Image: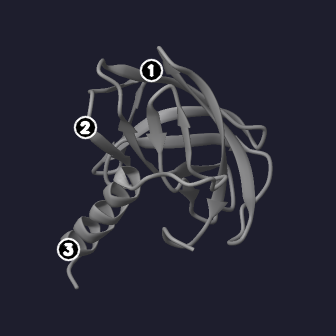
Amino acid sequence: MTYVRRRLIACLALLAAALAPLTAGAHSAEVAGVKIGHAWAPPAKGDGTAVYMPILNDRDEAVSLVSASTPIAQRVRLRETDDGEATFYSSLRLAPGQPVSLAEWRLHLWLDGLNRDLEAGDKFPLTVTFEPGGSVELEIYVEASPGH
């Protein structure tokens, strides 16, 4: 299977999770009409790692993801990489009704200054904040690939 095809299948799976009705799973959440699907991070040793998740703004107006934090890292930033170059952003605008996947090949959350290694099977809290809307704490699953 080609790299592009694998990524397309992964993206479609993430978008399906965002659009599916959310149940009471700790790693899926909703805050003020913004739905977040399965949130996960790959295992990591060292200073940083990414966090991926599908998001759907189910409101009538745009909202922005403006911040995120976790006790396991010094800071969390929105990051996109292209040909090995990282670009960081202060926020992510979410248009009404348009699903967005925070994913490896596009914009995602980056945890800088991890205070511990992350092994498959671990979990950790991550708080995300939307304006307008508020904050919600997610439980991030550490997995080699999405879906457990």
Quadrant where the C terminus lies? bottom right
Front-lying residue, 119 or 63:
63
Q: Nearer the viewer, residue 106 or 29?
A: 29
Which residue ends up furthest to the top in the rendered image? 132
Element under label 3?
helix
Write down the residue under mark 3. 5
Q: Hey, which quadrant is residue 5 in on the image?
A: bottom left
Q: Is residue 113 above or below residue 38?
A: above
Q: CA distance from mark 1 to mark 3?
A: 30 Å
Quick one: SS at disc 2? loop
Measured in 3D between alpha carbons, the distance from the residue under mark 1 to the one under mark 2, in whole angstroms, is 20 Å
Measured in 3D between alpha carbons, the distance from the residue under mark 2 to the one under mark 3, in whole angstroms, is: 22 Å
Above/below status of 142 relative to 37: below
Left or right of 3 on screen, residue 114: right
- The quarter of the displayed image where residue 104 is located: bottom left
Q: Kindly identify the residue that appears in the image at 39 percent across and 56 percent down.
A: 20
Which residue corresponds to mark 1?
A: 90
Checking the image for residue 98, the label placed there is 2
> Nearer the observer, disc 2 or disc 3?
2
Residue 121 location (% of width, % of height): 71, 71
Specify the color scheme. one colour
The tag earlier along the polypeptide, 1 or 2, is 1
Give whichever of discs 2 and 3 has the lower sequence position. Answer: 3
